[in-house]
Amino acid sequence: MICVTNLGMQYGAKVLFRNASINFDPGKRYGLVGANGAGKSTLLRILANDENPTEGKVSVPKELKLGFLRQDHFSYEDHVIIHVVMQGKKRLWQAMEMKEELLAKEEMDEKTGHQLAELEIIIAEEDGYSSEAFAAELLAGLGISVNYHHEKMKALSGGFKLRVLLAQVLFSDPDLLLLDEPTNHLDIISIRWLEEFLKDQFQGTLIYISHDRDFLNATATHIVDIDYEEVIPYTGNYERFLAAKELESSQRQKEIESVERKAAEMQAFVDRFKAKATKARQAQSRAKMIDRLEVPEAKLSSRVSPTLKFQQKRPSGKVVLTLKNIQKAFGALKVLNGIDKTIERGEKVALIGPNGIGKSTLLKIALGQMEPNNGESIWGYEAQVSYFAQDHHDLLKERTSVYDWLYAQAPHETVGTIRGLLGQVLFTGDEVKKSVNALSGGESARLLFARMMLEKGNVLVLDEPTNHMDLEGVEALADALQKFEGTVIVVSHDRHFVSKVATHILELNPTGARDYSGPYQEYLKRFGDDYLNRNLTSLHHQKPSQTQSKSTQKTKTPISHEEHKLQKQRINQLQRTVEQLEREIAKNEDQLQNIEEHFGKEGYFQSTDPMEIQKLQKEQERVQSVLTQHLQNWEATSLELEELRQTA
């Protein structure tokens, strides 16, 4: 059990929380919730002993093993991805490295033999024989293709590097696991996989922060609410927490009304009888009672929601956007395969699919920011687009104040209008003087929503708008989009948000797209929640269809010099992977042959200690498992390499 006693934290005059006492029980899963800036991440750092509290203490058993997801992937740039994961168990990794060094010696003396025996015990204790297979399972579950497992970390983008670090901390199998926004860089299927892993496989105590309502509902056994300087635990998931908070608020309001009603009745008695001699004493008594009455204070909250209201200057025509046979590839990497879609006025369309399938690319093609290899996108009559980009750093890199930046977007508007809009998105007082290049992710998103409200477009295109927003902000945005009378096209991995907003679903997949006219929950009922089957999708590449006609295969889409360069780099990368896998396979086969030679020696089983025999049998199983994995990886990588060479 982890015990928090009278914990307090403040930075200067700003108090985050005080007198917090809570016990975190073994095997339970605690979701931390609260407004941005309430102190959730600070509490995690205190629990991880990365930060000292202002007051109070955290008592953690000495033998407890801690896992904390730190975003320090830069220190692993030249490390092999699957090895980064396995380094989550330091004792195991050091033993395996030392074993490799000893086995590489040309001569084996008695001392080396003893060292190897000791290392084998450590490896067995740490489940080392199945460790690589488990690491591969974690990476695959988090959406990293097997073709990348033996590449170096620097081959991945920042978001996927964080997935590797998440796999590493899960691999470490800690007693206490601390996660800060683990779903931020995941797609829907990876989030689903993580939910199942945390519920079904992870046995320790989990304390985590998430702004994903469905994730909290699926995983949390308890909610810890940080609100207005208090840290209060609730039993149950997020929906039960909301119900409990609502009940608390309702009961407190009833108490306040009851006391106020009682005070009013006594005051009426005092006013009526204070002048009458026969009732004067009673009136004085009632007056004293009124003075002694304590009216419960309405509990203040640090939670605030932006007030979002999107309006359109004028409606668009009936047909808003037509996509005709949109195809896009980056060299051999095909991301869009013949997308056809007509979007009509008033529809709210959610694009879904795994990361890397082309959702953002399709938006950019529709907006004219990127050219397709084939097909066309046509905006309808009077379509006026307002766009929220996933990566909006370039828009907010200036050293200008929040007020000046928004005013520059619409210089014809009055000062009152600009200040009013900023107030709606929670920029008040001196906050309007903040420099836009110093804003947090959530603040940046709110400022861009203010701009969209100024623009009054009749088509809102949003690419991952909820990534840095708190739960209240996500809910406010969903409500505003629901009420918006125009057209919405949105990419989001937040299932609750998609469920609330979307009236149509466009699921992108390797063969094209599935178009469904209806909300997300109906879509799931019809097609199931395994619609992002990993056997049908790859997060990093799409292989050309094996049913493709020969005539189609012979037709090559001209590619640019830059795309040809990327294709060549990918071929070289795959060639190195194939060669590395072939070396690993040869090494594994030699290891198996050596083991079989031991077993084949005359009298081996009669003269050898049973423990040694068992150890060698386990080693045989481990090597065979690793060999099988390497063969599968070699086959997949070789196939992609061959296909790439044919198209080069």
Image (cartoon, rainbow, N blue to C red):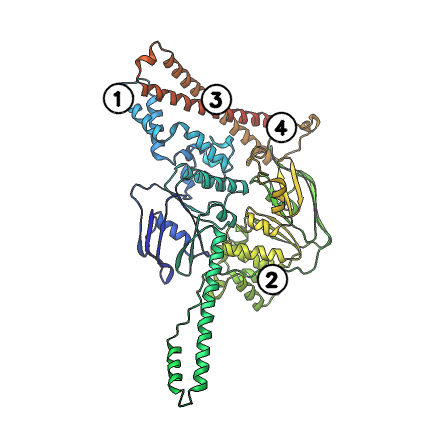
Pinpoint residue 436: horizontal percent, then vertical percent: 50, 57
User: Would you name the residue on which mark 1 appears?
Assistant: 111
Look at discs 3 and 2 and give the one toward the viewer: 3
- The percent coordinates of residue 429 (x first, y second) are 48, 66
Q: Is residue 341 left or right of residue 215?
A: right
Q: Residue 557: horizontal and vertical position, in percent? A: 66, 33
Let me know if residue 158 appears in the view.
no
Q: CA distance from mark 2 to mark 4?
A: 49 Å
- Dot 3 falls on a residue whose secondary structure is helix
Please say if the residues under marks 4 and 3 sit with CB atoms less than 8 Å apart.
Answer: no
Res. 270 visible in picture? yes
Inter-mark Cα distance, 3 to 1? 32 Å
- Report the residue that reaches farthest toward the top: 602
Q: In terms of secondary structure, where does tag 4 sit?
A: helix
Disc 3/disc 2 C-alpha distance (Å): 61 Å
Residue picked out by circle 2:
410
Q: Amino acid at mark 1?
A: Lys
Please tell me the numbered disc located at residue 582.
3
